[in-house]
Amino acid sequence: MGYEDFLERFRKEIRRFIREFEEDIEERSMWDINGRVEPLVSIDRRPDKYIILIDLPYADLKALSVDVRGRRVLIECRLSSGVRFSNWIVYSNTTFDRYYTEFELPEDAVVEGAVIERDESKKIIRIIVPRRRV
């Protein structure tokens, strides 16, 4: 394979990657017309556990629901008051009143040992999930 062939294959791969990335972004909105907003979620992988942080600004943590179905985690929480984005054309008539997200835990997560911590002042949920030792 010559240099030109290699360069053309590289360009095709870059175009494919960009196309897939754009499709992922377009498919997944962080809010919907039903008033749900997806919170920011980060998963930190440690040697012995996963630390999952869920950022829920303006949430009423007394209304927090964490449901685990197998390795699937569903989180829902009401906002302390509805939020409207009147400057946004698409959702200008929508009042966002709750957070909702779903995500899958890695296969080596030990769901039974999970611990949920709430930080009321920062409105952050911390879920600590042990990892199965191999």
Image (cartoon, rainbow, N blue to C red):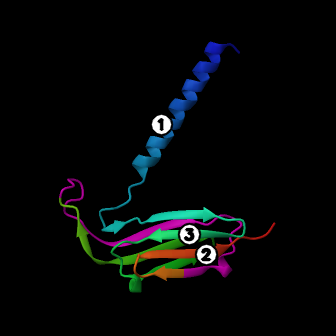
Q: Where is residue 120 in the image (x, y as percent from the top left)?
A: 42, 82
Q: Residue at x 47, y 37 (%)?
A: 19
Q: State the mark number for residue 127.
A: none
* Mark 3 surroundings: few (<14), some (14-19) or many (≥20) residues within 10 A: some
Q: Name the residue under label 3.
A: 52
Amino acid type, residue under disc 2 in the picture: Ile
Secondary structure beneath disc 1?
Answer: helix
- Name the foreground residue: 40 vs 5: 40
Of tags 1 and 3, which is closer to the observer?
3
Gap between marks 1 and 3, in whole Å?
29 Å
Instruction: Answer whether labels 2 and 3 touch (C-beta < 8 Å).
Output: yes
Q: Mark 1 points at which residue?
A: 19
Pick the quarter of the image with the N terminus.
top right
Secondary structure beneath disc 3?
Answer: strand
Secondary structure beneath disc 2?
Answer: strand
Q: Name the residue under label 2.
A: 128
Q: Which residue is drawn at 49% across and 64% down?
A: 41
| Magenta-drawn segment | 87-116
* Mark 2 surroundings: few (<14), some (14-19) or many (≥20) residues within 10 A: many
Residue 92 is drawn in which quadrant?
A: bottom left
Amino acid type, residue under disc 3 in the picture: Ile
